[in-house]
Image (tube, helix red, strand yellow):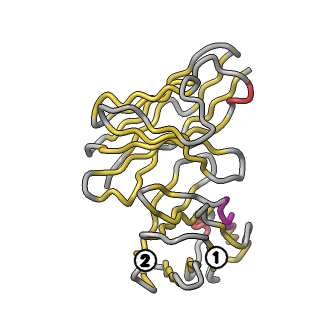
Amino acid sequence: GAVVSQHPSRVICKSGTSVKIECRSLDFQATTMFWYRQFPKQSLMLMATSNEGSKATYEQGVEKDKFLINHASLTLSTLTVTSAHPEDSSFYICSATEGQAKNIQYFGAGTRLSVL
Amino acid sequence: SQQGEEDPQALSIQEGENATMNCSYKTSINNLQWYRQNSGRGLVHLILIRSNEREKHSGRLRVTLDTSKKSSSLLITASRAADTASYFCAPDSWGKLQFGAGTQVVVTP
């Protein structure tokens, strides 16, 4: 089946630093990738949708300068949390859709970000 | 918003029992999907039911969809300890999934 790899799985950083999270589709070309944020025991909140080679579409209330998304190839999207603050601590999850079967999203394992 | 809302929030059952959880949403959809999430992990797609379908089966899973009531249900039959996870419904319209807060299912041996 379609596999999405997300790295790192866990990152601890100091306030003010930037953190990059990678999302790779290992065995398929991901036409669209999604980035979510999840708080404990809560829903996944869609942050942005990215298509290869074009700018990401951010959801309302998500700061595009704070959460930089790059989708440079059909197998890689990155999320950079710039100048991270403790309130950015969360679980970030990416997903990808494959070609014509765009309905089903394949998820990475998530990245636990802790900002000190 | 067409965010899915699951009910109950939590469910505790014993192995071998069936687990049923429900989902409601507010607007029209193209399809509705169910996903599961193990603690601290990503989501795994379980099943997709299209808006013109009423029932769908996949192994021990049975999903129903009632578009007139804007509701869906997920039934897990003969549950196993490995079914312990959070289950999310995700109404899909225009390619965006709107996840609810999930139903946390605990299956005890």
Q: In the image, B42: left or right of A41?
A: left
How far apart are the two marked residues, 2 and 1, measured between alpha carbons? Answer: 19 Å
- Mark 2 and mark 1 residues within 8 Å of each other at the beta carbon: no
Identify the residue at image location x=69%, y=31%. Answer: A89
The magenta region covers B101-105
Secondary structure of the residue carrying numbered label 1: strand
Residue B51: assigned label: 2
Q: Is residue B104 magenta?
A: yes
> Percent x, y for residue B87?
60, 64
> Percent x, y for residue A110?
54, 40
Identify the residue at image location x=33%, y=33%. Answer: A54
> Percent x, y for residue B30?
42, 69
Q: Which chain does the numbered disc 1 sit on?
A: B
Q: In the image, B22: left or right of A58?
A: right
The amino acid pointed to by label 1 is Met
Residue B21: assigned label: 1
